[in-house]
Amino acid sequence: MNSKPLIGLNADYRSAKKDSPAFSYIQAGYFDAIVKAGGIPVVIPPLADEDDLNRVVDLVEGLVFVGGADLDPRNDGFMLHPATRTLDARREQFDRTLMRMAADRRLPVMGIGVGMQLLNVTQGGNLFLHIGEDLPKALPHRDSLDPAHRHALEVVPGTLMERVYGEGEIRVNSFHHMAIDEVAPGFTATARCPDGVVEAIESNQSDWFAIGTQFHPESDSASALDLRIFEEFIAGIRGVAIEMRLVA
């Protein structure tokens, strides 16, 4: 692949309110990071027709699932926790459909925040619904008064996360109250907070390049080093394209 790869991003969505119409949107940090890493971002609104969505997915070489509010645990057979602030139902249904398509096609995927949680639950894992209750000894993972709140990160040797961060002290942003409990089959936790909370996962399946981060490497509070996650994702997509050409 000599040209820059097209990277699809799922757009967020807000239903109409009394004082404003419905609209779809995305934080600039996501597509800016893709551009800096050598890709071309393609923002995908929450399409309802699967044939239309398949047509769009045909055009992209990878997908980035962006962050946002919480997944509705009722969609995975769990009760709604009082601390849950769910995604708009239209966005969540769209995200789940898009993730299913990506998994079926083995299209490279990067999930961020709730995007990583979606990757995990759709592939058979599950979530802690509220860290404060499920893991009472955990470090703070959100500070409502400090949007730039950070905590340490411990990475697993020999992983993409180690290639990004190497050795030494690592700190990443943190503003979440849900987290991965059981990691989905076919995936491995490759970075954790020192309290054990999963902060990154990677596919260990030879036919699917997929990664996720609970923290946000695209945000204003991210470090310059965090951009390398996007660079590794783009490099992985190029590697998948080369393998496909060799097989063909």
Image: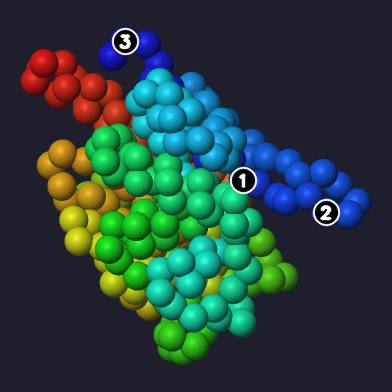
Foreground residue, 195 or 213?
213
Residue 12's disc number: 1
Task: Name the quarter where the C terminus is drawn.
Answer: top left
Local crowd at mark 2 within 10 Å, few (<14), some, or many (≥20)? few
Residue 168: quadrant of the picture: bottom left
Local crowd at mark 3 within 10 Å, few (<14), some, or many (≥20)? few
Q: Amino acid at mark 3?
A: Asn
Foreground residue, 199 or 115?
115
Please tell me whether mark 3 sits on a helix, a strand or a loop.
Answer: loop
Image: 84 above or below 134: above
Q: Identify the residue shown where x is 42% and y is 42%.
A: 98
Residue 71 visible here: yes
Q: Amino acid at mark 1?
A: Asp
Q: Identify the residue shown where x is 27% and y is 51%.
A: 202
Q: Are marks 2 and 3 in contact (CB under 8 Å)?
A: no
Residue 48: quadrant of the picture: top right
Pointer 2 residue: 17
**Dot 1 or dot 3, earlier in sequence:** 3
